[in-house]
Amino acid sequence: MQREFELRAESHGCEPSVVRGRATHFNRGERVRRAAKIFFPLLAAALASLPIPAWHLAAVPGFLIAALVLGVRRLRQSERVEALEGPCPACARGQTFPIPERLVLPLTLRCSACGEFVKLQSARIS
């Protein structure tokens, strides 16, 4: 399910602007499927590494730890941000902002057009 939201974009000495975001919400079944898609291939890689001498000493624990960590991370992820679009408060050019792996607000990004820092916050413009 898609959800849209607004963020406040600020740049030093400029009027704030609104950046619109789009996120996909995952229900429990989708989260389990996404976790399984990463867990089972890594588990298979761990099992395939077992008969390889010396390699299995590092590969098996590495693949198992990666499978657990990434599987649990996807299982806990209730939504994923797909897009952040809006004008830069410094130069007013519309753009698509890069989305980091984990979106934690406040988030400081750089405008690709003017190079100014843009701070994204969840507070609305008053």
Image: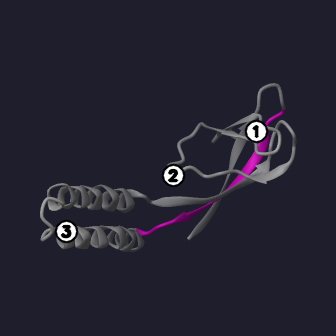
Magenta stretch, residue numbers: 15-27
Q: Position of residue 29 (x, y in %)?
A: 38, 74
> Type of residue at label 2?
Glu
Q: Is residue 17 magenta?
A: yes
Question: For residue 125: magenta?
Answer: no
Image coordinates for residue 53, horizontal then vertical, percent? 12, 64
The residue labelled by disc 2 is: 101
Sequence-wise first label, 2 or 1: 2
Asked if residue 98 lies left or right of residue 69, the reply is right
Mark seen at residue 49: 3
Sequence-wise, the earlier of marks 2 and 3 is: 3
**Residue at 41% from the left image edge and 73% from the top image edge:** 30
Image quarter for residue 43? bottom left
Say above or below: 68 vs 45.
Answer: above
Where on the picture, by quarter, is residue 16?
Answer: top right
User: Relative to 21, is 51 above or below?
Assistant: below
C-alpha span from label 2 to label 1: 26 Å
Q: Quickly name the residue at label 1.
A: 125
Residue at image position (15%, 68%) is: 52
Helix, strand or loop for the magenta stretch, by majority: strand
Residue density around tag 3, few if under 14, some if 14–19, many if 20 or more, within 10 Å: some
Nearer to us in this view, 47 or 9: 47
Q: Are marks 2 and 1 in contact (CB under 8 Å)?
A: no
Q: Secondary structure at mark 1?
A: loop
Judging depth in this view, the residue of 25 and 89 nearest the camera is: 89
Q: Nearer the viewer, mark 1 or mark 3?
A: 3
Residue at the image point whose x is 84% and y is 33% from the top? 15
